[in-house]
Amino acid sequence: MRLRVATVAGAVGLRGHVRLIIHTDQPAERLYVGARLLTDEGELEIADVRAAGRGYQVAFVGHEDRTSAEALRDRQLYIDSQSEDESDDEFFYHDLIGLPARDLQGHHLGQISGVLAMPAHDVIEVRTDHGTVLVPFVSEIIPHIDSTEVRIDPPGGLFS
């Protein structure tokens, strides 16, 4: 699965730099010289990075002039969210959306339709045949998550 980290806003200057619209909360970890970003048209390697106010400007290998950089306008930049250094119990919330929700016995409860950030703890939205159920995202209620399903141990009456 791909995670969108930025969008190219347009060329800056004459040496191939572009302004980025940032979509990640970790731009310094995603945008560095040598980083390879995915696009719908292939891969781009960052040749230079510079901070610009609250944003970033980057130059890509093979796009060393303004004309070439301007051709990248509106291009979406992604990383692969399944990096090798992730452990089996780490995931992005967007990876959960669309997964089936099952109880501990394997009975289908519904489908994950969203994750909400709440003050006390996050909540997952489970779309059922009877509407949406909000489930506290705590290990006592959601003891198991993998790439194929979310297991829920619901308190009595939550899905009734």
Image (cartoon, grey):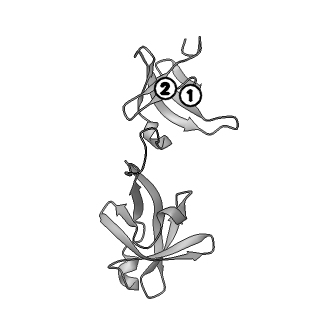
Q: Which residue type does callout 1 highlight?
A: Ser
Q: Which residue type does callout 2 highlight?
A: Arg
Q: Nearer the viewer, mark 2 or mark 1?
A: 1
* Residue 74 in the image: above or below residue 131: below
Where is residue 44, by image quadrant?
A: bottom left
Horizontal side of 81 relative to 26 (left or right) equals left
Indicate which disc, 2 or 1, sits on the residue closer to the N terminus.
2
Tag 1 residue: 139
Circle 2 Cα neighbour tier, 10 Å, few/some/many (<14 / 14–19 / ≥20)? some
> SS for tag 1?
loop
Q: Quadrant of the C terminus?
A: top right
* Residue 84 in the image: above or below residue 54: above
Q: Which mark identifies residue 52?
A: none
> SS for tag 2?
strand
Q: Nearer the viewer, residue 99 or 21?
A: 99
CA separation in Å, label 2 and label 1: 20 Å
In this view, the residue farthest toward the right is 119
Residue at 70%, 38% in the rendered image: 119
Tag 2 residue: 127
* Residue 76 in the image: above or below residue 88: below
Q: Nearer the viewer, residue 94 or 67?
A: 94
Residue at 38%, 64% in the rendered image: 37
Circle 1 Cα neighbour tier, 10 Å, few/some/many (<14 / 14–19 / ≥20)? few
In this view, the residue farthest toward the left is 42
Instruction: Give how far across and how far down residue 31 sits, in percent.
Output: 48, 67
